[in-house]
């Protein structure tokens, strides 16, 4: 036999056996049994025990109800589901045990504690499949709700990797390995198939649903799931579902996002050392989230890109507007998440005051745009207008020093409500009334030491010293005896005490009701507020991009559609800021439809990878509407960026480093187009030399010859034999990294020049790395022996498709350096480039021992 309360807990637990129950008892949420034993160490709280009947005990732990949102993430982010069980009736109005029920299910995608997300979105995603794939995702803290559909599973995977959802909702029985990296929650298929509730709520989205019928079903699954998770919420802040056309944005695969370190560092998995960290000078949370979206979804339409750049350029040119906007934006709170908190009943008076102050800043921002005659930002004026009355009402109503609980009173400012002010006067003890009564009683009793007091245990009382007890009137009723005095009550004082207690209860109720009316006014204006939030976010991003461009000397790139990428003195936006050594060395790149593959040779540590990544980042920055780190840049739009960089394996699936490398290359070759940008770093190095060389040669040929490909490509390699491709194909250009030799030592100049490297300098790099001298001497001997015994009389037959594994290549009759000089375009070189080239040429001629 168990206690009635634990029996109630058991019945509720049976409804959600896979969840930890937060069971409301008074001011605490308690956990029992296995739930308590799991939660206590994670939450770092004491594990105790409670009587379970017949002398038995049950494990128990608990957390204060007012702090529950700070404890939930600790459990949920460890993979546990939590069910919030509340009292659903007032204990004062019931006999026996209070009724309780589950009011909310908390999973990673339904967390409301925004401190866990910083400037990121916390997405809940839903996936459904019929003939095509449907994807819907929502951040319930901001109301951001989007859908789309595609026939490509790879695009679905790329989008999941982009949004990185905390939770993925799938129909039961529908599991694929690609989803295993996420927290997967399986629900009944009917969640997705019944779209009536979704259509009823979003009646104005009929066209979107018609164009994305499978995406609509994915969204229906999410909507049903949210309705079940928040049965008491109307989700007022979720005002629309939007879609996006895939042809308008660039889809980046996970390898590219990781290798370019767009928003997350490979080494630390945080923002430091990322493109986002460089570009993020935003002052608002909404602006920071929008900037992340822009970085992860570059644009593909020239007119949209140019419109963004126009805004950035205007702010660069108008420093007064730029700086004044920065100052005003620094006072802006997160409007999206404030509205979300209000919708879910999580907002307190301080949140409302923050909202009122933020809305109060909008007219100042509008005036700045008008006074500075901003042509580019004037379109945002209407989006931020019409909220002046609501702002004034909130600021007039809310007490800045209000308590955190909306049911404890002290929410409203004095003077806002006369009824509240009168009740406060009574509830506070009515100092004037008490003083008057005290004076009257002194006159009536002739006891000059008589005083009226109050404490929480006995309430109001009249205190008279023992020396004056003989003067106490007959209508005084003894209440408490002290050592030196007696305390009394009178009918009049008792009546006033009842009035005060009643006033306190009325005051809390009336303040709460006024607060809820004000909350409804805010929610009625959700659409306007969220429109203003989006406007503020865009302005904030433009101001941020302008600030970064000024600080780092960026230029506006020319956006083209002729297939040319021409960057003069380009710089890596992250590396140039993080370098603690010499000044960053800028470099040029020219890719054209006729010369679309640049083969880059040179030693490790010389800067090949940095150079290739900087080209990709400059292109990406241009397509998000940012200025770029270069002296001059002409960027033809690319439809995607693909990267194959570094060595990694997938031990979980038994795939070697080389297998992963080949699968990534295969993906690129299948999905790239002539308008794509491909970055290949040391492809083929994960296998035997001749195997790798064969593959690298064939991959280069494939990119050069395939009419459906011919992508703009940067290919860094240590296979110097590949430089002979320039003799056979017109679409390739050889580049190399300049190295200065100083005896047996080398200095990396990090300068990219035309032509091919003649050596890898592997032993020099090993020396810099600190390998033992005797080891290096032995390696030098072995290298000399290997070079002298290599077969140099055979070459690859580029016209024979049956040749799979080449041997080393025949030395041409004309020395490659002489051939390189003969093809040099001197008129296109700057004086500095010409001097660098001559210096490099002398070193290479000396090292080749032909002088």
Image (spheres, rainbow, N blue to C red):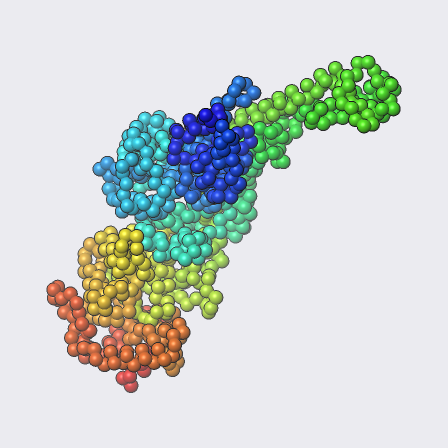
Q: Residue 381 in the image: state x and y as whole percent.
A: 48, 39
Q: In which quarter of the image is residue 176?
A: top left
Q: Give residue 520's position: percent from left, percent from top.
A: 50, 27
Question: Residue 357, image x and y in percent?
Answer: 57, 37
Tell me what residue is drawn at x 39 percent, y 50 percent: 295
Task: Name the side, left or right, on which 718 lies relative to 830.
Answer: left
- Furthest residue toward front: 55
Instruction: Tell which residue pokes out farthest to the bottom in this image.
Output: 851
Quadrant containing the C terminus in the rendered view: bottom left
Q: Does residue 570 appear anywhere in the picture?
A: yes
**Depth check: 591 or 144 in front?**
144
* 719 with respect to 541 (left or right): left
* Vertical position of residue 365 compared to residue 776: above or below: above
Say above or below: 621 vs 490: below
User: Which residue is nearer to you in this view: 504 or 358?
Assistant: 504
Q: Quadrant of the N terminus?
A: top left
- What percent of the width, then of the height, locates residue 53? 49, 28
How many numbered badges does the structure rendering display?
0
- Position of residue 450 relative to residue 553, above or below, is above
Q: Nearer the viewer, residue 602 or 820?
A: 602
Q: In which quarter of the image is residue 188?
A: top left
Q: Which of 498 and 391 is in front in this view?
A: 498
Left or right: where 441 falls relative to 280: right
Residue at horizontal 69%, vertical 26%?
457
Q: In this view, does 11 lie to the left or right of 97?
A: left
Q: Residue at x 26, y 69 (%)?
A: 719
- Report whether residue 532 is seen: no
What residue do we see at 43% from left, 59% from top?
574
């Amino acid at each position: 036999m168990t206690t009635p309360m634990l029996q109630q807990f058991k019945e509720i637990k049976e409804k959600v056996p896979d969840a930890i129950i937060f069971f409301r008892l008074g001011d605490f949420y308690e956990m029992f049994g296995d739930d308590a034993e799991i939660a206590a160490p994670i939450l770092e709280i004491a594990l105790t025990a409670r009587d379970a009947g017949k002398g038995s005990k049950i494990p128990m732990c608990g957390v204060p109800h007012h702090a529950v949102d700070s404890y939930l993430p600790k459990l949920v982010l460890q993979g546990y589901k939590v069910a919030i069980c509340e009292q659903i009736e007032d204990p004062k109005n019931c006999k026996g045990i209070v009724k309780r029920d589950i009011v909310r299910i908390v999973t990673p995608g339904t967390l409301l504690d925004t401190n866990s997300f910083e400037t990121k979105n916390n997405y809940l995603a839903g996936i459904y499949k019929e003939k095509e794939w449907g994807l819907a995702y929502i951040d319930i803290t901001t109301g951001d709700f989007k859908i789309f559909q595609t026939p490509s599973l790879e695009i679905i995977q790329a989008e999941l990797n982009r949004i990185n959802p905390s939770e993925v909702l799938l129909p039961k029985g529908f599991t694929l390995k690609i989803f295993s990296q996420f927290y997967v929650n399986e629900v009944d298929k009917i969640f997705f198939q019944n779209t009536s509730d979704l259509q009823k709520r979003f009646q104005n989205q009929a066209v979107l649903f018609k164009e994305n019928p499978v995406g609509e079903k994915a969204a229906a699954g999410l909507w049903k799931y949210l309705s079940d998770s928040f049965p008491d919420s109307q989700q007022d802040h979720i005002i629309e579902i939007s879609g996006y056309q895939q042809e308008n944005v660039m889809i980046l695969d996970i390898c590219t996002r990781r290798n370019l370190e767009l928003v997350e560092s490979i080494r630390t998995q945080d923002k430091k050392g990322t493109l986002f960290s460089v570009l993020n000078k935003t002052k608002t949370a909404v602006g920071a989230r929008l900037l992340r979206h822009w970085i992860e979804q570059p644009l593909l339409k020239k007119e949209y890109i140019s419109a963004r750049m126009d805004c950035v350029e205007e702010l660069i040119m108008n420093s007064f507007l730029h700086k004044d906007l920065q100052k005003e934006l620094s006072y802006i709170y997160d409007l999206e998440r404030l509205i979300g908190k209000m919708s879910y009943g999580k907002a307190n008076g301080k949140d409302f005051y923050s909202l009122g102050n933020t809305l109060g800043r909008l007219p100042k921002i509008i005036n700045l745009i008008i006074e500075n005659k901003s042509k580019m930002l004037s379109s945002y004026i209407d989006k931020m207008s019409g909220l002046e009355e609501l702002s004034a009402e909130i600021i007039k109503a809310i007490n800045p020093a209000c308590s955190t609980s909306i049911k404890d009173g002290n929410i409203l400012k004095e003077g806002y409500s006369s009824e509240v002010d009168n009740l406060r006067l009574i509830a506070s003890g009515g100092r004037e009334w008490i003083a008057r009564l005290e004076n009257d009683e002194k006159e009536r009793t002739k006891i000059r030491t008589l005083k009226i007091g109050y404490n929480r245990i006995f309430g109001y009382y009249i205190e008279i010293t023992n020396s004056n007890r003989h003067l106490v009137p007959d209508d005084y009723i003894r209440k408490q005896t002290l050592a030196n005095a007696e305390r009394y009550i009178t009918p009049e004082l008792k009546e006033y005490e009842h009035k005060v207690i009643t006033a306190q209860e009325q005051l809390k109720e009336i303040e709460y009701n006024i607060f809820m009316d004000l909350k409804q006014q805010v929610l009625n204006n959700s659409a306007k507020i969220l429109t203003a939030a989006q406007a503020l976010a865009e302005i904030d991003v433009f101001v941020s991009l302008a600030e970064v461009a000024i600080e780092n000397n960026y230029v506006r790139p020319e956006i083209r559609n002729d297939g040319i990428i021409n960057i003069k003195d380009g710089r890596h936006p992250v590396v140039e800021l993080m370098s603690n050594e010499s000044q960053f060395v800028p470099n040029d790149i020219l890719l054209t439809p006729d010369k679309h593959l640049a083969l880059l040779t040179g030693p490790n540590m010389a800067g090949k990878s940095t150079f290739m990544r900087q080209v990709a980042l400059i292109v990406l920055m241009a397509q998000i509407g940012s200025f770029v780190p270069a002296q001059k840049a002409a960027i033809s739009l690319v439809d995607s960026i693909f990267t194959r960089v570094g060595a990694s394996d997938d031990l979980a699936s038994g795939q070697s480093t080389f297998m992963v490398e080949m699968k990534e290359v295969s993906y690129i070759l299948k999905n790239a187009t002539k308008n794509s940008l491909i970055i290949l770093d040391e492809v083929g190095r994960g296998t035997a030399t001749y195997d790798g060389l064969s593959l690298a040669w064939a991959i280069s040929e494939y990119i050069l010859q395939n009419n459906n490909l011919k992508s703009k490509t940067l290919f860094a390699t240590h296979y110097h034999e590949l430089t002979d491709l320039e003799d056979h194909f017109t679409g390739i250009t050889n580049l190399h990294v300049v190295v200065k030799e100083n005896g047996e030592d080398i200095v990396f100049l990090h300068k990219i020049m035309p032509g091919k490297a003649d050596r890898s300098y592997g032993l020099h790099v090993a020396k810099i790395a600190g390998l033992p001298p005797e080891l290096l001497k032995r390696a030098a001997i072995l290298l000399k022996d290997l070079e002298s015994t290599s077969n140099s009389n055979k070459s690859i037959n580029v016209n024979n498709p049956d040749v799979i594994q080449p041997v080393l290549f025949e030395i041409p009759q004309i020395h490659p350096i002489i051939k390189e000089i003969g093809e040099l375009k001197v008129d296109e070189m700057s004086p500095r480039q010409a001097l660098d080239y001559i210096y490099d040429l002398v070193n290479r001629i000396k090292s080749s021992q032909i002088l």
